[in-house]
Image: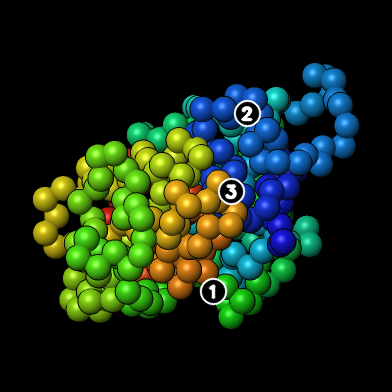
Amino acid sequence: MSRFRPSDPRSLPRRGFLRGGLAVGAATVGASVAAACGDSQAQGPSSPATTPAHALIAAFPQGSAHIPAGVPMRLPYLISDREGVPLSRIDGRVAFEVARDGKVLGGSEVAPRGDGVPRAYLPFTFDFPAPGIYDIGATYRGARIESTVQVVEPSRVTTPVVGQALPGVGSPTVANPLGVDPLCSRDPVCPFHSIDLQSVVGRGHPIVLLVATPAYCQTAVCGPVLDLVVEQAAGREDLRVIHSEVYRDPKAHRDLSTATLAPVPAAYHLDFEPVLFITDRTGTVVARADVTVDRSELRELLTLAT
């Protein structure tokens, strides 16, 4: 099984990430990210005097073909405390810097987000010019914290990214569930299961597509993100909003790693969630938010659709 490495440094099966293994905002996250992420590869015990006060945690897959060169990519980061627990609040804007082979290529200051989601995060966006390994540095409370990312050729990334046409695949609906059960694991169910994605892509209306499974995500993130979409899309007749569950038949599997994916995440080759896609009227992806998005950022991303 392919693996990716969060930047704190700990490793996690990619399907585990699909099941919410990073535990962004999970109720059990206080037991440390390692408890949620599976096996730890920490280099041994450290004393409080030598352990950094904070660490930069990538809340997205690493070590896999996730970041294409030449495409602006939104990369959500968390900041953890000395014990590896993600902060529920990040104080002030955080300066990010991208470098390769010791040469600084750029960066920006990122405002923390967290309105309506359980953990604060930093949505850093950067357009990496070429494939390779890049160093990501951030300054928090006067100290530098670091991570790395791997950037690949665009042809290796199989999930739709900004600037590409959203594939018009058939999606489950109330009228035609395509064998997906439950059609919506939110309680109460959301109102976004009446439209077939294939019938609306490129038909003159912006599309909001959320792939998430509130009941089976194993974190406290999927439900809040869907709730925010329900809130922000209320009364928006100009948008075509669709929610897709992740699994076709999760109730039939004690171990979700063996569950079949629902049609949309299968067609999009998704191995993590939640993922939010927003298109313009032509069906071109204008925004993609992976793993977490709060109320204010969602509001800003929806303006890109129109």
- Looking at numbered disc 3 in the image, what kind of residue is underneath it? Asp
- Measured from the top left, where is residue 185 in percent x and y? 35, 46
The residue drawn where x is 11% and y is 50% is 235
CA–CA distance in space, label 2 to label 3: 26 Å
**SS label for mark 3:** loop
Asked if labels 2 and 1 touch by Cβ distance under 8 angstroms, the answer is: no
How crowded pointer 2 is (Cα within 10 Å; few <14, some 14-19, many 20+) is rated as many
**SS label for mark 2:** loop
Name the residue nearer the viewer: 196 or 62: 196
Rendered position, 254 above or below 36: below
Q: Earlier in the sequence, mark 2 or mark 3?
A: 2
Which residue is identified by label 2? Answer: 85
Rendered position, 36 above or below 178: above
Name the residue nearer the viewer: 108 or 226: 226
> Does any portion of residue 124 appear in the rendered image?
no
**Quadrant of res 206:** bottom left
- Residue 255 numbered tag: 3
Front label number (2 vs 3): 3
The residue drawn where x is 54% and y is 74% is 158
Rendered position, 172 above or below 158: above
Colouring convention used in this rendered image of the protein: rainbow
**SS label for mark 1:** loop
CA–CA distance in space, label 1 to label 3: 26 Å
Q: Earlier in the sequence, mark 1 or mark 2?
A: 2
CA–CA distance in space, label 1 to label 2: 32 Å
- The residue sitting at the right extreme is 44
- Residue 158 numbered tag: 1
- Looking at numbered disc 2 in the image, what kind of residue is underneath it? Val
- Measured from the top left, where is residue 256 in percent x and y? 55, 51
